Image: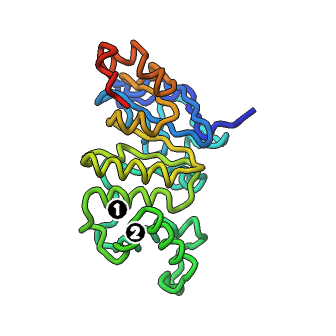
Amino acid sequence: MTVAALELDGVRKNFGLTEIIRGVDLAIEKGERHAIIGPNGAGKSTLFHLISGKYDKTEGRIRLNGEDVTDLPPYEINRRGLSRSFQITNIFPRLSVFENIRCGLLWSQQYRYCFWKLVDNQRDLNDRAMAVLEEIGLADRAETPAGVLTYAEQRGLEIGITIAGGAGVIMLDEPTAGMSHSETEQAVELIRRVTVGKTLVMVEHDMGVVFNLADRISVLVYGEIIATDTPANIRANKAVQEAYLGVTDDAVEGVA
């Protein structure tokens, strides 16, 4: 029996008396690119926070590569092979682009807290950081303070930090939000390239990105998944059209 990369079983989240996530069951296979879509307020970011350990679950279990990670803190979940980006860009603006990537590498490269070892002298670590920068197309910006990068470059840098540690499950929260059409195309190609051989889970509002990247799509509405299927079947699903994509077939014919 194949073990799913990520599995949610009856996951619920209440804030006081308000039920936000209402019993989500979901299995995402290893190597799959899986998109979670839904209207504003559906609970997509909350679900991401539950999976990554930022929020405690009210009910349910979450398994990563078959291991129960339900009650683990975020750093322990990360060390077991899950890494994520955030809806709002989350980088170290005063550090250089290179230093941002190197920070994302430290634990996975077996570097621990040490007062007498300078990271600038660790050739293997620095070589790996430069390799990641080459992979995300920011090698020529290595010494630039991260805070002065363009918005699209900062989003690309955050993706670089997310993949730097070598996690097998990568979660991206609206990776192309706020980008122009050309920037979005570049971001999609970057995501496709850096997630080869990994499991990708993403929240995204741009349906062009979703249908371009995803192997399967889950539709979250009012805290419940109403459908999980291939892009073609999701596009044709009447319940999905009514709840999110539109109310007629014509409304989604142009989505590719």
- Vertical placement of residue 61 versus 76, above or below: above
Residue type at the position of mark 2 = Asn
Tell me the quarter of the image containing the C terminus. Answer: top left
Q: Which residue is mark 2?
A: 100
Tell me the quarter of the image containing the N terminus. Answer: top right
| Residue 152: image location, x then y, percent | 29, 56
| Residue 164: image location, x then y, percent | 50, 62
Q: Secondary structure at mark 1?
A: loop
- Vertical placement of residue 48 versus 155, above or below: above
Q: Nearer the viewer, residue 83 or 56?
A: 83
Residue 40, picture quadrant: top left
| Residue 92: image location, x then y, percent | 33, 66
Q: Which residue is mark 1?
A: 91
**C-beta proximity under 8 Å, tags 2 and 1:** yes
Q: Secondary structure at mark 2?
A: helix
Q: Is residue 125 left or right of residue 234?
A: right
- Vertical placement of residue 29 versus 53, above or below: above
| Residue 44: image location, x then y, percent | 38, 34
Q: Earlier in the sequence, mark 2 or mark 1?
A: 1
Q: Is residue 125 left or right of residue 182?
A: right
Residue type at the position of mark 1 = Ile
